[in-house]
Each structure stands twice: as C-alpha cells, then as structure tokens.
Image (spheres, rainbow, N blue to C red):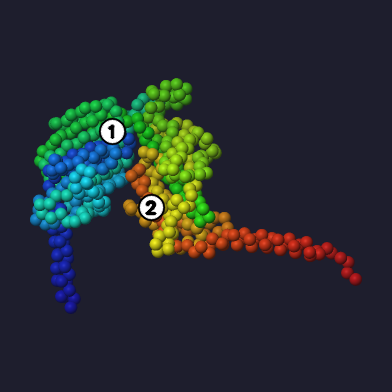
Amino acid sequence: MGVLLIPRLTLTLTIISLFIFLSRSSSQEILINNAERRIDLSTHIVKVFLTLKFHPTNCVWINMYVELMSFFQVENIGTNAVSEILLAFPPTQADHLAFVEALATTGKRKKKTYVPLVVKPTELPDAPNETKYFSISLVNPLNSGDTTTLEVLYVFTHSLEPFPMEISQSESQLVYYRDSALILSPYHIKQQTTFIKTPTTKVESFTRLDPTNRAGTEMKYGPYEDQPPYSYSPIIVHCENNNPFAVVEELVREVEISHWGSIQITEHYKLVHAGARHKGIFSRVEYQSRPSFSGVSSFKHLLARLPPRVHSVYYRDEIGNISSSHLRTDSQKSDLEIEPRYPLFGGWKATFIIGYGVPLQDFLFESPDGRRYLNFTFGCPLAESVVDKLTIKVVLPEGSKDPSAAVTFPVEQHLETKYSYLDVVGRTVVVLEKKNVVPMHNTVFQVYYTFNPIFMLAEPLMLTSVFFLFFVACVAYLHIDLSIRKGF
C-alpha cells in the first residue's frame, strides 16, 4: 500500500507544480503598450503616480495631488486567463514601502466607476535580484485579448537622504532621491515615461539620460521604447527640500470607552525631525529676526486634525501644560495647532501628550446581531507625518466579552487587561500595532464586543455598599460603649 502511495504523491505534487507554473507563466503574457509614472517629492513622503495605458484616446487624466491615485491598463496577449497582475519593487524600495492601493475602473470620464481590489505581497521562486512583488487580484479573470484598467497608488517613507547630513542654522536642506528612469516590471513595456516633481526649482544635480528634459520643478525621463521585463536604469536627483520631516518614532493612543456618555482619548508622542542634523550653535535672536533665512528647514508648529465635537482638550509635556496651542472646531472637524516648547531642527526630539474627549453616541454603535462596536479613525492625526510604530489600545468597559477588531489592512493584534478605579476583574484592552504608518492609513476601524447592561450597575452598587457599610460602622461606633468600668 505504501509503495502505491509514493507514485500517487509524486504525481499530485507534479500536477500542483505544473499548475503553479502555468498560472505564473500566464501572468507573464501581459503587454503594456504605454507607461507613465509621476513621482511627487514635494514632502518627505514620496508618492508615486503610475499610468499604464493601451488606448490613449479613451484615457481620463486624474490629478495626482487630489486623488493621489495611479491607473494603468493591461492587456492579456496570451492564451490563458489571468487572475492577478504583479507589481515589482527593488528590495531597497520594498523596505520603505508603506502603502499600496489598487482600484479597477470601468466606463469613461464622468461615468467611471471604481472597484477596490485586494493587494497583498507575494513571492516568486525565480525573482531576479531579490525583487519584491505585490499581486493585484482582479475581480474577473482577464481572458485572452481583453484589457482592463487599474489605478494604483504606492507611498514610500524614509526615501529622501539628506546630503549634506549636517547643516547649520542658516543653510537650506538638500536631499538625495534614488530611483530608476525605467519602471521595474515583470512585463514588456512598449513605451514609458517618468516624471519627477521637486519641491522647488533649486536642483543641485540629477542624472541625465537620453532623452532627459527639465522645466521648472519637473524633470522628464523618456519616452523609452520597447523595454524588456526587469529593465532598470538608476538615477539620482539632488534637490532642495525644506519641508518639515516630521517623524513620530512611537505613538501610543489609548481609547477608553465609558458607557456613561464619553470616550476619552490620550495620545503619547515621541517626535523627531528626521532631516539633516543641526550643527553649530542655535541663535534665538537670528531665528526670530530672519525667519525666511534662518532655520528654513525647521518647524515650530504642527497641525493635528481631531474628530468633531471634541471637549476637554489638553496638550502637555513632561514639564506641564503648553499654552501655545490653538483649537478651531466646527461641525465637521477640529483642528488643533500645537507648538512645541522650542523649534525642532534636524535630529532634535520632543515628547508630549494630547488628550481629549468625544461624545459616546458619535463613535459607539450597535450592530444588527446585538453587539456593540467602536467606529474610530486609525493612523496619526498630525498632518504630513510618518509614524514608525503606532500602538492603539482600545479599553473596553469592565464586563465586556468576545472582543474583535476589523481593520482594512494587516495589523498585529493581541489582548491585555487594565485595572482602573473600582475595577474588580479588570477591563479588556484590544491592542492594535502597525509600523510605517502614513496619512493614507487614516481610515476607520471597528472594535466589536458584547456587553450586558447589568454591569453598568456594578460601580454604583459598589459605591453604595461602601457608603452604607461606612454609615453602619459610624452608627455602631456611636452606640457601643467601649469605656472600661469597675466591676462589682
């Protein structure tokens, strides 16, 4: 019997391997007729807008600074149906890749519709030079001769290298950006062009290839014809970038739910200016008298976008409350403009706490199955900031059971227990952790749990019992004669 199982197992593995090979081979039967990529270096968060087209006359341009999306059309020139499209990244970029999003589009112009697609990392056994891949799963398989239009946005962090690495208070900040003039792709590209947008017109140097053009803040590489798969041509851009390099090394947000009418949020920040390090002596007089020339790459205020209808807002550090902050609220949002105690130059750090409360009815709801769930925003409220490590702790009311979290992207999850005032068994804490967080991660997430309303009476009953026992003890003390008398 065992002898017969060995050939069957070998045949099964052969069939599976052949199926995987055919599926991978079919994905290679994709042709890109025209590719256009736009790289935005306006801030320290690099956004890439990629366009791959087959029918330029039917193409609708999308503003990369509004939608921050990219789209491309792919065509199946093979004989087998294809169910996924591959995106390729060199290992140096994959380590800094923070966000990838893809949409499938149908229709033209104002009648265009968008369908979100699943994007996940994948591996190929024969990946050249340790290339990293992401697969985009199509809604419907792409048959032979068909085309489809996809829109993709991907974002890189820590991809701008300050050079020189140290600058004085009066110097501007210069950075290196390294990439390829050719799009790294596992597919053949008939024609492609790359555009790079710099923050200012001050460009120290950039790699020149034939053809290369520059006009204002934009550089153009290409067009390049008939590039085979995995073509690569390294380029370097050395330009000025004085925008704040606000990086939160660690952010711990605690969201405490109280069924008595409020949700309290406390956020602990460890902020650093990740640009070129400051050298020399800091002159406050020069900084205030010549603000347009002195410390142009530093920043002294940040904008935190908080939920609407916030109350009890405070902003403090280790020393105490910081009064140099301004809060503007309306029915749609709340903007908190904060100023650290000192301006932040490259390499300087600051730690502080932001706390506020929001109404319970704005963020806590009941699902059709009777469970309650918190609907809150993931990510960091500081505008144009990168978070190296984000930890969100959702503290559920005591007595909550069966907690679960729903997030639209992969995060690490685990449970903890926290003891607060008048707690007996402790409160369940749902902990969500994610690294390399960018503003595109500011989407809502949900935390579901079951709760019996009888537990809301636990603390009032405990307080009532304590006061009652104290009252009885006082009465007993007043009526008991504890004096020592001489016996007869």
Please tell me the numbered disc located at residue 279: none
Counting from the top left corner in percent of width and height, residue 398 is at: 51, 60
Name the amino acid, label 1: Tyr
Q: Is residue 51 left or right of residue 155?
A: left
Vertical order, 104 against 64 (above or below): below
Which residue is under mark 1?
176
Q: Residue 158 in the image: x percent, y percent? A: 32, 39
- Residue 390 or residue 377, whichever sits in front: 377
Residue pictured at 18% horizontal, 78% vertical: 1
Kind of residue indicated by mark 2: Phe
Task: Report the side of 363 relative to 34 (left or right).
Answer: right
Q: Quadrant of the C terminus?
A: bottom right
Q: Residue at x 23, y 30 (%)?
A: 218
Tell me: 80 left or right of 124.
left
Query: For residue 371, what is the image quadrant?
Result: bottom left
Instruction: State the CA–CA distance, disc 2 to disc 1.
Output: 36 Å
Q: Position of residue 286 (x, y in %)?
A: 44, 22
At horizontal 44% and vertical 33% (from top left) the residue drawn is 301
Mark 2 / mark 1, whichever is N-terminal: 1
Question: Residue at (40%, 35%) from the top-left corner?
Answer: 273
134 w.r.t. 177: above or below: below
Q: Which residue is mark 2?
A: 445
Q: Is residue 210 above or below residue 486?
A: above
